Amino acid sequence: MCQTGMIRRGRGFVHFLISDSGLFSRLCRFSLSFSALMADPPDNNAYASASLADASLADASLAAAAAASSATGGAGIEGWPLSSTRPLSAKSWGSFTNLLETATAISQTMPSDAMKAMDDYRIAVERIAQKIVERTADPTEGAFIEETFAYKRLKGVCFVGHVKTDLDSVAGAIGAANLFDGLACRSEDNLNGEITYVLNEVANVEVPPLFDDTAGAGLPDENGEKRNVCLVDHNEPKQMVPSLASDMGRIIGCIDHHALSEGFASSKPLLIDIRPWGSMSTIITHLYIRLSSPISKSIARLLMCAILSDTLALRSVTTTDADRFAVAMLAKLGEIESPDTVAKQMFKNKTRWICNLGPYAMVRGDQKDFTVEGWKMGIAVLEVTDTTPVLAIADKLLLELRILKKEKGDRRGKENDVTAQLDFAFLFVVDVVKQCSVLLVCGGREYALASKAFPGCEFHVAKEGMGKAPGTTIALNQTLCDVGSLVSRKAQFVPALSQALASNFTCHRTRVTDPSYKQGTSGALLDRVLSNRQAEVRVSLDGQQLERDVRVAESALYDQKW
Ligand SMILES: [Mn+2]
């Protein structure tokens, strides 16, 4: 029997045409059309058709209700501040009122995009999820072809994500290793609060071992061999585990959703799967489906959280319909009733973790360098559910940004290489709840570029009562730029700044690589402080953060005194 379900989504819509003409054609059409659906760009008006089994809508919604009622049990997903399961123990009415206001504001300003996706795709998800479960018992012809001819070479390899690691990198490596019987590794020791929350409390999976310490990955195994490597979530050598970047011959594959970098070259052909989707974990999800591989509850939760993380709960401009669909389906398979509740907890855990790091790590945690027309800029991003605690230490962050620019020129045992320093260092503080950002502007060059890149955006003082500007080429009320609804480094910050640099940008200084480059007063003083080792970084007394002795550096930058 034939059934047609139609789902409207924004400007595009997806049309599911159901036919029932023999297993092979059905499964092939299903597989092909599902690929088409997943590959559709968000604004494409294309139609994708999928053969569906004959389960009735009533059955589907009953199944959904049953799944919903058994969902999340004991997964450690706490309620939002005023959840009925967590009695409030506010000390005073004042703090109670504050809490109430915050909770209300957050629930109103964080719309349910994941829930919307689940509604949009409900019919398709119910049926496709059921189909996937069926197919894993009896893999399809399409999956046989994919596995035998395309993905066999990923069997048993080591999967590893980028340094300055994030949930998408860690979850994608675990998901891929599970799919291809491989070895998942983490690229570095420290994992942020969002990653540990999701691994420990939502997905219940082990933290993957560190690449450099693991036999077969960074170390030889008992046979003296190292495995082949498939990169996930990155392709730029600068973002690779350093020991891998110097041994790139081991890389046999790459699954990613970033632009292909100029530095990524190979002597042999590679298996490359790069798609313009919002998260690498969406690609992994699709691979499970193509290969008719079962997605366990735990893997479904892990991949779902990674997609929510990379797409800021499906609200970043990088979000595609493939991500929306994958979240809806993974929520179903992972028995998660409300992905939004999970997303809020994830972001809350990340914010708490970030703010505990201190200014040194906050500036360096998620920081990437870019070169445009010979100008070198570093762009750091902090994604938080509340910008207040970040802006409360804005003066310290501005100083760290200035030090970061110089630190890039540090050469072990040799004199600082000025040409390796940065021309600009920026820190964007992204409010993931309100979906807007502010930019910390640490000096005159940064101000010159930001005012050109973000025309019409207002500048303010970064921190009330800051007193002095960082240097003589910037005014106090130019240290913070309100960039409004922009939230994505890849899709918005970098393009805006690059475009400004590419259109004959000049300012009061030349490029650091220019032989005539000369730094300003506060820069020169700061240089002296750093080379005299008067602003050393050490582990704090509680062992929780790296902290800098800033007294001399602060007076060099803010008072031009040393
Ligand atoms: Mn990613």
Image: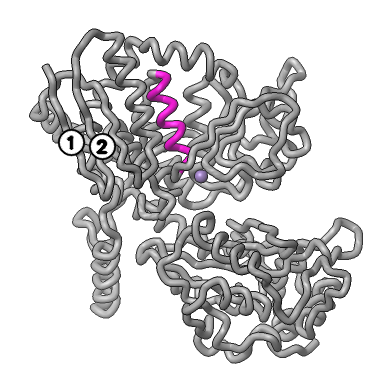
Callout count: 2
Relative horizontal placement of residue 176, taking residue 62 as reference (left or right): right
Whether the magenta-drawn stretch holds residue 446 is answered as: no
User: Pointers 2 and 1 in contact (CB under 8 A)?
Assistant: yes
Give the residue at x 60% y 79%: 395
Residue count near mark 2 (Cα–Cα under 10 Å), binned few <14, some 14–19, many ≥20: many
Image: 517 above or below 178: below
Given residues 248 and 382, the one toward you in this image is 248
Highlighted magenta segment, given as a residue range: 279-291
Residue 507 located left or right of residue 429: right
Residue beneath disc 1: 6
Q: What percent of the width, then of the height, locates residue 392?
A: 50, 77
- Residue at left offset 70%, top offset 88%: 472
Crowding around mark 1 (Cα neighbors within 10 Å: few <14, some 14 to 19, many 20+) is some
Quadrant containing the N terminus is: top left
Amino acid residing under circle 2: Val
Residue 331: image x %, image y %? 30, 38
Return the x and y of residue 21 as percentages of the image width and height: 21, 11
Position of 511 with respect to 379 (left or right) is: right
The quadrant in which residue 513 appears is bottom right
Q: Label 2, label 1: how many angstroms apart (C-alpha)?
A: 7 Å
- Secondary element under disc 1, as helix, strand or loop, is strand
Q: Which residue is mark 2?
A: 14
Q: Looking at the image, which residue is at 27% across and 14% down?
A: 26
Point out the tag, 2 or 1, that comes first from the N-terminus. Answer: 1
Tell me which corner region of the image, top left, top right, bottom left or bottom right, holds residue 442: bottom right
Type of amino acid at the residue the image marks with label 1: Met
